[in-house]
Image: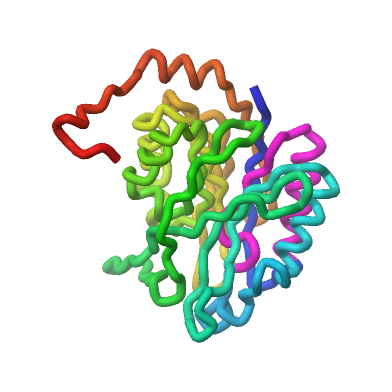
């Protein structure tokens, strides 16, 4: 077994404030001897407007948030998964990238995944968001990569609603599915837990979902409830919701014997002679 730490924070437009929140979580993770720390989507910042978000976005080599996080990873020899924003490769673009970065124990960015599915939502008497106006979608699945807590399959937030990507990662031998997120309270209350349990069960994999929580600004709040779910679909650890804005962390043992036991009991032999293989 290997111990994973899952952080929950409330990002604002201040990268210095957000970095301090992450440092608080890192200290707790190191004190418990965690092998890896998983942080939410958009840990670097959540802006109050598209213009502010664009102005805050810096290349990885110049981001004070990311540089600070890399220093912490190197200092503590701690592996860190974190959601950040990065500029488009097109300097004329008004959209930016929403990415998951894997920072190794040397403080280097070793893996990068760009969010595929963008959150466009128009609900009557509910939240309205069009992520596609400001975020540039990725175009490829990152192959699962090794870590002390298992082979990791990277996704971000709205990707959770598309089982195809999770199944594709499982077929490539992912043990743990990652969903750093910033769900709205409305969609979180209705769909967060059912979707995460479904992905864990149908892929017979662990799920780690580090979440944003609380009010980021006057316009935007997040659901919270960072969670770890085992391959049987049982909740291993979970944090609270919307009103908790202080940085928190939960811990979960990734049990490799249980993972293999569940997969052996339920081999899930797909009928690819009848329907396409994902």
Q: 156 and 251: which one is in front? A: 156
Q: Is residue 194 left or right of residue 248?
A: left
Quadrant placement of the C terminus: top left
* Residue 66 visible here: yes
Please, is residue 39 above or below residue 54 in the view?
A: above
Please, is residue 119 above or below residue 51 in the view?
A: above
Give how far across and how far down residue 230 sits, in percent.
49, 28
Give how far across and how far down residue 179 sits, in percent.
49, 47
User: Residue, x 28% and y 22% (percent of image)?
Assistant: 269
Please, is residue 90 above or below residue 164 in the view?
A: below
Q: Is residue 152 left or right of residue 159?
A: right
Give how far across and how far down residue 204 sits, in percent.
41, 27
Quadrant placement of the N terminus: top right
Span of residues in magenta: 17-45
Q: 171 and 50: which one is in front? A: 171
Q: Is residue 127 left or right of residue 224?
A: left
User: Residue, x 26% and y 37% (percent of image)?
Assistant: 277
* Residue 243 visible here: no
Q: 177 and 214: which one is in front? A: 177
């Amino acid at each position: 077994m290997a111990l994973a730490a899952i952080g929950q924070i409330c990002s604002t437009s201040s990268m210095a404030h957000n970095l301090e929140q992450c440092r608080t979580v890192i200290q707790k993770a190191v004190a418990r001897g965690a092998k890896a720390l998983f942080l939410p989507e958009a840990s670097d910042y959540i802006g109050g407007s598209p213009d502010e978000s664009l102005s805050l976005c810096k290349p990885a080599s110049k981001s004070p948030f990311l540089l600070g996080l890399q220093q912490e990873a190197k200092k503590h020899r701690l592996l860190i998964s974190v959601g950040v924003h990065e500029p488009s490769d097109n300097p004329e673009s008004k959209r930016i990238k929403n990415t998951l970065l894997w920072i190794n124990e040397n403080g280097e960015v070793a893996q990068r995944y760009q969010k595929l599915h963008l959150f466009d939502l128009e609900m009557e008497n509910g939240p309205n968001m069009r992520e596609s106006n400001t975020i540039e979608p990725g175009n490829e699945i990152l192959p699962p990569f090794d870590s002390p807590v298992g082979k990791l399959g990277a996704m971000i937030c709205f990707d959770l609603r598309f089982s195809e990507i999770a199944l594709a990662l499982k077929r490539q031998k992912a043990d743990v599915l990652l969903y750093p997120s910033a769900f709205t309270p409305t969609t979180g209350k209705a769909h967060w837990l059912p979707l995460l349990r479904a992905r864990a069960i149908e892929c017979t994999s662990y799920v780690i979902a580090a979440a944003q929580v609380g009010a980021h600004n006057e316009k935007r709040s997040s659901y919270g409830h960072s969670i770890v779910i085992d391959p049987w679909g049982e909740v291993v650890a979970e944090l609270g919701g919307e009103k908790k804005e202080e940085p928190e962390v939960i811990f979960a043992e990734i049990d490799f014997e249980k993972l293999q036991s569940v997969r052996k009991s339920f081999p899930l032999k797909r009928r690819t002679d009848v329907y396409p293989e994902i």
